[in-house]
């Protein structure tokens, strides 16, 4: 049994146009045929896949430090130390030689506790960026995530750990890096979450 082939509407129209083709009327034929081709191309135009949305990494605000004493305790100890230093200095000035020397040594010992109490480095991270806090009067340096090019962690010749922050403006800032163990790895995970490249040489 023989079945006649089936044609779509576009194919029938094209077949009709070809059957009417004459060399004298070529221009009219090709105008009609091009319209037919354009319609067919538009009908089967590929659908462009929508580009995936870039998800912004969201993190909870966190603080990272290695302070043995909290801020308020440092402030209390520093105030007490300064008061004792003042009293002992006055006693050393008005005391006789042996007692004066002891008072002077006590003042000297208290003096060397001021810097560790006063200076410290803490890091605060949020969705906006990284904040470096440096001492009791809240000297701080903020960085937005998008201005950070990379971060280096290294030790100097005295084995002191530092963090160097390279900015996209070609500036660099460095601070002491006190984080160890758990805090260190948690801090690195936050940087990785925010797509910050870290060169870790610790």
Image (cartoon, rainbow, N blue to C red):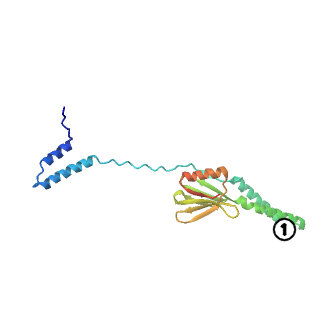
Q: Is residue 21 visible?
A: yes
| Relative height, residue 9 to residue 112 (above, below) | above
- For residue 16, side relative to residue 191 (left or right): left
| Relative height, residue 102 to residue 18 (above, below) | below
Nearer the observer, 101 or 147: 147
Nearer the observer, 142 or 52: 52
Residue at 46%, 50% (x, y): give it: 54
Residue at 64%, 56% (x, y): give it: 122
Q: Quadrant of the N terminus?
A: top left
Nearer the observer, 23 or 163: 23
- Crowd tier of the residue under label 1, counting other residues whose Cα lies within 10 Å: few below 14, some 14–19, many 20 or above: some
Judged from the image, the secondary structure of the residue bearing numbered disc 1 is helix
Q: Quadrant of the C terminus?
A: bottom right
Residue at 77%, 59% (x, y): give it: 81
- How many discs appear? 1
> x, y percentage for residue 198?
58, 57
The residue that disc 1 covers is 93
- For residue 99, side relative to residue 2 (left or right): right
Residue at 17%, 43% (x, y): give it: 12
Q: Is residue 96 visible?
A: no
What is the residue that sits farthest to the left in this orientation?
Answer: 24
What is the residue that sits farthest to the front in this orientation?
Answer: 1
> x, y percentage for residue 191?
57, 53
> x, y percentage for residue 9?
20, 42
> x, y percentage for residue 59?
55, 49
- For residue 8, side relative to residue 53 (left or right): left
């Amino acid at each position: 049994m023989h079945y006649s082939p089936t044609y779509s509407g576009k194919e029938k129209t094209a077949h009709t146009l070809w059957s009417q083709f004459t060399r004298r009327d070529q221009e009219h034929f090709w105008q009609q045929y091009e319209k037919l081709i354009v319609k067919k191309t538009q009908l089967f135009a590929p659908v462009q896949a929508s580009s995936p949305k870039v998800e912004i990494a969201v993190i909870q605000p966190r603080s990272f430090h290695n302070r043995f004493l909290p801020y308020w305790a440092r402030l209390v100890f520093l105030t007490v130390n300064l008061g004792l230093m003042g009293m002992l200095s006055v006693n050393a000035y008005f005391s006789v030689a042996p007692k004066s020397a002891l008072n002077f040594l006590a003042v000297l010992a208290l003096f060397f506790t001021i810097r560790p109490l006063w200076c410290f480095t803490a890091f605060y991270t949020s969705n906006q960026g990284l904040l470096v806090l440096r001492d009791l009067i809240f000297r701080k340096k903020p960085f937005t995530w998008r201005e950070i090019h990379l971060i280096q962690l290294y030790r100097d010749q005295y084995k002191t750990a530092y963090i160097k922050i390279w900015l996209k403006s070609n500036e660099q800032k460095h601070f002491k890096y006190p984080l160890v163990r758990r805090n260190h790895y948690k801090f690195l995970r936050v940087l990785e979450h925010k797509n910050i490249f870290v060169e870790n040489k610790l």
